[in-house]
Amino acid sequence: MQIVLMRDLKNTVEIERRCAESNEPVFITKNGYGRLVVMDIDYYERTMRRIDEAALINRGILDYENGNTVDGKKSLKRLREKHGF
């Protein structure tokens, strides 16, 4: 975990280097408390993609638990009949 003091935030080149080299967020503290998080855009996009995927999986699990499912064979049969293939 990378931690940088707020007063050192003005050295943006160093912050950028740390993000790129560690491939993880850099935490900015003020008076000993976390205030900001800085991260490389690739790390951000990967993290957001994982969050989206986890949300979709959780929604699928809830659908299954609540009985909101369709029999696969019956569904395929209806689609074939409807579209003639």
Image: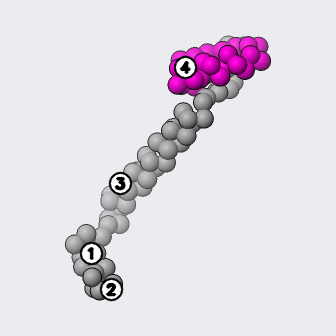
Residue type marked 1: Leu
Which secondary structure, mark 1? helix
Please name the residue that numbered disc 2 is placed on.
Answer: 82
Which secondary structure, mark 4? helix
Disc sitting over residue 28 in the figure: none
Above or below 31: residue 60: below
Q: Position of residue 73 (x, y in %)?
A: 22, 72
Residue type marked 4: Glu
At a point 31% along the width and 79% down the height, the residue shown is 79
Could you tell whether 48 is left or right of 85 in the image? right
Disc sitting over residue 61 in the figure: 3
Residue type marked 3: Ile
Q: Are marks 2 and 3 in contact (CB under 8 Å)?
A: no
Disc sitting over residue 76 in the figure: 1
Please name the residue that numbered disc 4 is placed on.
Answer: 21
Q: Is residue 34 magenta?
A: no
Question: How many residues crowd around disc 2 within 10 Å: few (fewer than 14), some, or many (20 or more)?
Answer: few
**Residue 79 appearing in the image:** yes
Earlier-in-chain disc, 4 versus 1: 4
